[in-house]
Image (cartoon, grey):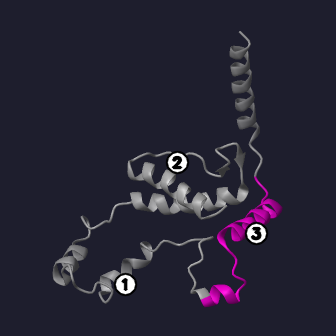
Amino acid sequence: MDVQIGHEKTLTGLMPVLAGADLIYGLGMIDMGMAISYEQFLMDAEFVRMFKRTERPVETDEDALALEVIKAVGPAGNYLSQKHTLKHMRDEISTTTLIDRRMRESWEKSGAKDMPAAARELAEKILAEHRGELLSEEVQEKLTEIIKREEALLCR
């Protein structure tokens, strides 16, 4: 996992989202899709959360106050000093789990862990601690029916 794979994952994930696709393929895949990496999956999931944010429109149509602020401040003004901006900006901030946005000095003092290392730690934690819920008997029975039906079709 290096800069190249990060760049490729960003391009192959962001471009379809910007084009309107609602499915992003290949999370966790490495080696031309011949292998899956838990670390890569977690990094890709973080990228996808950010990509999906680009789909959400900037909402001003229903917010008359926002339009008033835009008109009053103008294109070269300071929106950060506006009460309306302060009230709504936290809804627009992109939060991350694996992307470390600290200043370099702080990052180095805490061990200079890169994104793949942070993803590896998170994957190990999830694998050690996560306990999924079992499917209900009803769901298990339905899945068994579907499998039997499809197996019968394959054996024709």
**Residue at horizontal 68 percent and vertical 48 percent from the top:** 31
First in sequence, mark 1 or 3: give its number.
1
Is residue 45 visible to the viewer in this orientation of the structure? no
Residue kind at label 1, given as amino acid type: Leu
For the residues labelled 1 and 3, the Cα–Cα distance comes to: 35 Å
Residue kind at label 2, given as amino acid type: Ile
> From the image, which quarter does the C terminus lie in?
top right
Residue 123 image position (x, y, % from top left): 74, 62
**Bounds of the magenta segment:** 105-132
Residue kind at label 3, given as amino acid type: Glu
For the residues labelled 1 and 2, the Cα–Cα distance comes to: 33 Å
Q: Secondary structure at mark 2?
A: loop
Q: Is residue 107 magenta?
A: yes
**Residue at horizontal 51 percent and vertical 58 percent from the top:** 10
Residue matched to label 2: 24
Q: Nearer the viewer, residue 55 or 100?
A: 100
Discs 1/2, front: 2
Residue 42 image position (x, y, % from top left): 65, 60
Residue matched to label 3: 121
- Residue 98 against residue 152 in the figure, above or below: below
Residue 65 image position (x, y, % from top left): 23, 76
